[in-house]
Image: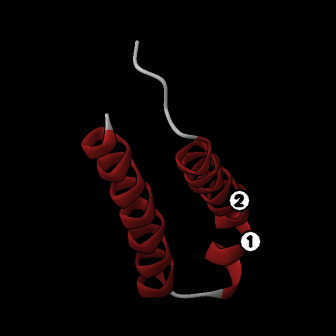
Amino acid sequence: MKSIRKDLKLDLIASIVAILIFLFSVPRLIKTSDLTTIAFLGICVLLLLICNLRKIHSND
């Protein structure tokens, strides 16, 4: 397995933390926000993860 640079590891960890924060805050968001806000935030978090995974894949 190829090693991943340290800054890319930090980007990936930050993406995973953002996903976890989003998943744990969804029940509260459902009570206070509409579905378009939740969908927009979810798409932003997924795009962040996809961009970081592509960056890691292209550097290997």
Q: Is residue 10 left or right of residue 50?
A: right
For residue 47, what is the image quadrant? bottom left
Could you tell me if the residues under marks 2 and 1 are in contact, i.e. CB atoms within 8 Å? Answer: no
Quarter of the picture containing the N terminus is top left
Disc 2 marks a residue whose amino acid type is Ile
Disc 1 marks a residue whose amino acid type is Arg
Q: Nearer the viewer, residue 13 or 56?
A: 56
Which structural element holds mark 1? helix
Disc 2 crowd, CA 10 A, few/some/many (<14, 14-19, 20+): few
For residue 33, what is the image quadrant? bottom right
Disc 1 crowd, CA 10 A, few/some/many (<14, 14-19, 20+): few
From mark 2 to mark 1, how far is it between C-alphas?
12 Å
Q: Nearer the viewer, residue 21 or 37?
A: 21
Query: Where is 14 relative to 43, above or below?
Result: above
Question: Which numbered disc, 2 or 1, marks the residue that appears first in the sequence?
Answer: 2
Q: Is residue 21 left or right of residue 8?
A: right
Question: Residue 21: which disc?
Answer: 2
For the point 64% across and 55% down, which residue is it? 14
Query: Where is 12 relative to 25, above or below?
Result: above
The x, y position of residue 34, in whole percent, is: 52, 87
The x, y position of residue 32, in whole percent, is: 69, 86
Please give the residue where the numbered disc 1 appears in the rendered image: 28
The x, y position of residue 18, in whole percent, is: 63, 60
Q: Nearer the viewer, residue 56 or 20?
A: 56
Q: Is residue 56 left or right of residue 22?
A: left
For the point 63% across and 62% down, which residue is it? 22
Quarter of the picture containing the C terminus is top left
For the point 49% across and 86% down, which residue is it? 37
For the point 41% across and 60% down, which residue is it? 46
Which structural element holds mark 2? helix
Q: Residue reaching furthest left?
A: 58
Query: Where is 45 relative to 2, above or below?
Result: below
